[in-house]
Amino acid sequence: MHKRFWLKTLAGAATLVITGGLLSGCSSDAPAFHGVDITGADYARGFELTDAQGQLRRLEDFAGKAVIVFFGYTQCPDVCPTSLQELAETKRLLGADGDKLQGVFVTVDPERDTEQLLTAYMANFDAGFVALRPSPEQLPEVTKAFKIYYKKVPGQTPTSYTMDHSAGSYTYDPKGRVRLYNRYGSGAQALADDVKLLLQGK
């Protein structure tokens, strides 16, 4: 794992913790979320990107569901598979409400992550999760809109590079409002607890 990756991740998480604290206030009536409450944030508002089947997708397509959006790439050695496995476990923990959770994976490596590769990759975790593939031109715009850090790190060959990237995810309520920032490694149970609250209209 690259040192600058962790520095960027920790810095981003610290910023979001501060922001979340300002936005959520001190009301005792506020839900006891495990994730950082960023309700009302002016970023990560939505997306309009093509999925692995070539279909244009928007956040509005998943109205009525809690949505968790994560950025990564298929050749990521640890953070991405760990996070997606955690998300699949979160869906299982929700039991009968599992179908009310939508996982969305956005690649930061559209150069290598073809539609076919993304489809196969998502099937390793949950076939119902959606993979989105920004074009190289869209990638800077969408990552900026979500405050996502990413950087190509050259390898020994032109195609063996890795990607440093932010490791957290965003959770949206059934009305499509961004509500939480989830730190990497939060745990499936914590995510499931938060999703349950959002499904209850909290």
Image (cartoon, rainbow, N blue to C red):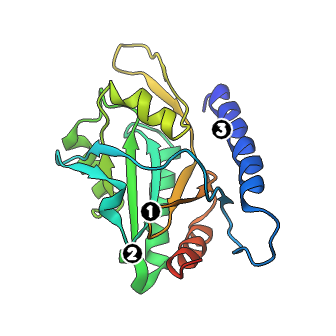
Disc nearer the start of the sequence (1/3):
3
Q: Amino acid at mark 1?
A: Gly
Q: Is residue 90 left or right of residue 9?
A: left
Residue 176 badge: 1
CA neighbours of label 2 inside 10 A, class few (<14), some (14 to 19), many (20+): some
Q: Is residue 135 left or right of residue 13?
A: left
Identify the residue shown where x is 75% and y is 78%: 29
Q: Quadrant of the N terminus?
A: top right
Residue 48: x and y in percent read: 32, 45
Q: Gap between marks 1 and 3, in whole Å? A: 25 Å
Residue 11: x and y in percent read: 72, 36
Identify the residue shown where x is 60% and y is 77%: 202
Q: Are marks 1 and 3 in contact (CB under 8 Å)?
A: no
Tell me the mark number nearer the camera, choosing from 3 and 2. 2
Q: Gap between marks 3 and 2, in whole Å? A: 29 Å
Return the residue at label 3: 9
Pick whichever, 77 or 71, lies toward us: 71
Q: Amino acid at mark 2?
A: Lys
Q: Secondary structure at mark 3?
A: helix
Residue 51: x and y in percent read: 25, 47
User: Which quadrant holds residue 38?
Assistant: bottom right
Tell me the mark number nearer the camera, choosing from 2 and 1. 1
Tell me the mark number nearer the camera, choosing from 1 and 3. 1
Disc nearer the start of the sequence (3/2):
3
Q: Is residue 80 left or right of residue 41?
A: left
User: Which quadrant holds residue 99?
Assistant: bottom left
Residue 100 badge: 2
Q: Are marks 3 and 2 in contact (CB under 8 Å)?
A: no
Q: Secondary structure at mark 2?
A: helix
